[in-house]
Amino acid sequence: MNTNTIESVKEKKHHEFLSENTDFEVRSMDTMCVNESELKHPVWHNLKYMVAGILFGVILIKAEVISWFRIQEMFRLQSFHMYGVIGSAVAVGALSVFLIKKFKIKTMYGEPIEFISKKFNKGNIIGGLIFGFGWAITGACPGPLFALIGNGATVIIVTLFSAIVGTWVYGYFREKLPH
Amino acid sequence: MNFLEWIKQPWPWYVAGPLIGLIVPLLLLIGNKAFGISSSLRHVCAACLPANIPFFKYDWKKEIWNLFFVGGIIIGAVLVTQFFSNPNPIELNPKLAADLQAHGISNFRGMVPTELFSWNSLLTVKGIIMIVIGGFLVGFGTRYAGGCTSGHAIMGLSNLQLPSLIATISFMVGGFIVANLIMPILLKL
C-alpha cells in the first residue's frame, strides 16, 4: 500500500516533469534523437556511431568543409564548392528519407524508422542569424569544430569550450528569450 | 600519380556532398538516430553543469550516441591528418587570396589561417573576437535556432521541414552580413 502511494507520486512527478518542457523538448524543438529507440542496448553498441563519426570526420577534412578559407569563399560568393557540397548532401539525404518512408524500411534491429516534424519558432530566425555570425567569424559550425581539433588546430579547443558556454547561457536565459 | 598522391588530394563537392548525405540514412538505419551535431554541446552541459536549469534536466545518457559520434569525428580527423592530408596550400579564389594577403594573412597551408587562429593570437583583440566570441555565437545561436548545419540544413531539409529551411536561410543571411560587412573591419584590427 505504502509503496503503491510512493510509486503513484513518482509517476505524477514524472508527468509534471514532462509537461514542463524539459525532456520532451529534446525531441521536439531540437534536432536530435527525435525518434528514440525503444530497444535497450549495451553501451558498446554506441561504437557504431563512433564509426559513423569517423567517416564524417574524414569527409569533412577531405572536402575542406572545415576550412575557414572555404567558408569565407562561400559567404563572399567566390566559389561554388560549399554550395555543391551542402546541395548534393541534401539531395542524397532527401532521396534516402523519401525511400525510407516509401518502402517503410526498418532499422537493423527491425524497428520502424520514424520522423517527427519540427515546429517553427522565432528562435529559428534569431538564433539562426546569431549562428550565422559565428559561422562566418570562426569558419566553423559545430561538426567542423571537432574536426579542426583533430586536424591539429588545438586553439579551437577554446572555441569549442566557448560554444559549450554559449549553449549553457542559452539554456540559462531560455525562458526570457522570444520563441 | 600513385595511389597515395591521389588519395591525398582534396575531394570535389560531387564526391563529398553525396557521402555526407549518406550519413543521414546510415544513422537512421543503424539506430533510428536523426543526424545532428550541435545537441552534443547541450549534452555536455547537461552532463557537466546542469545547475538545476530545466533545459539541462534530462537523461543525457540516453543521448550518449551523439557524444560517440562527435568523438568519432575527432578520431577521423586525426587519422586523415596523419596519413592522407593534402600537402599543398588550399586553392583559393584569387580575389579572396589577394584580399586576405592585403590584410596580412598569407599562410594558406592549414585549415585555419594561423595569423588569426593560434595560441599566440588568442589574447589579442582579434583573437578574442574570433576564437572566443565567435565560438560563443556558434553555441548560443545553434541552440537558440534548434540545430546547426547538420541538424537543420542537412537532416531538416532532407525531411522537407519548413522551420529548417527558415533556419538555414537565417544562417546564410547572418554569414553574408558578417563575412562581407564585418570581417573587413575585424581584419583591420
Image (tube, rainbow, N blue to C red):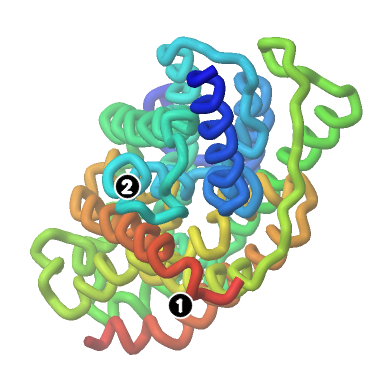
Which one is in front, A127 or A61? Answer: A127
Amino acid type of the residue that numbered disc 1 sits on in the rendered structure: Ala
Amino acid type of the residue that numbered disc 2 sits on in the rendered structure: Leu
Residue for badge 2:
A148
Residue for badge 1:
B179
Quadrant, the C terminus of chain A = bottom right
Residue B161 in the image: x percent, y percent?
A: 76, 54
Q: Chain of mark 2?
A: A
Q: Residue at x 57, y 53 (%)?
A: A20
Vertical side of B94 occupied by B38: above or below: above
Quarter of the rendering containing residue B106? bottom left
Q: Residue at x 33, y 89 (%)?
A: B185
Residue B79 in the image: x percent, y percent?
A: 32, 28
Q: Residue at x 45, y 54 (%)?
A: B54
Q: Secondary structure at mark 1?
A: helix
Figure label count: 2
Residue A68 in the image: x percent, y percent?
A: 38, 61
Respond whether the residues carrying marks 2 and 1 are from the same subunit: no
Would you say the residues marked 2 and 1 are in contact, meaning their CB atoms lie under 8 Å apart?
A: no
Q: Which label sits on residue B113?
A: none
Q: Chain of mark 1?
A: B
Q: Secondary structure at mark 2?
A: helix
Vertical side of A150 occupied by A121: above or below: below
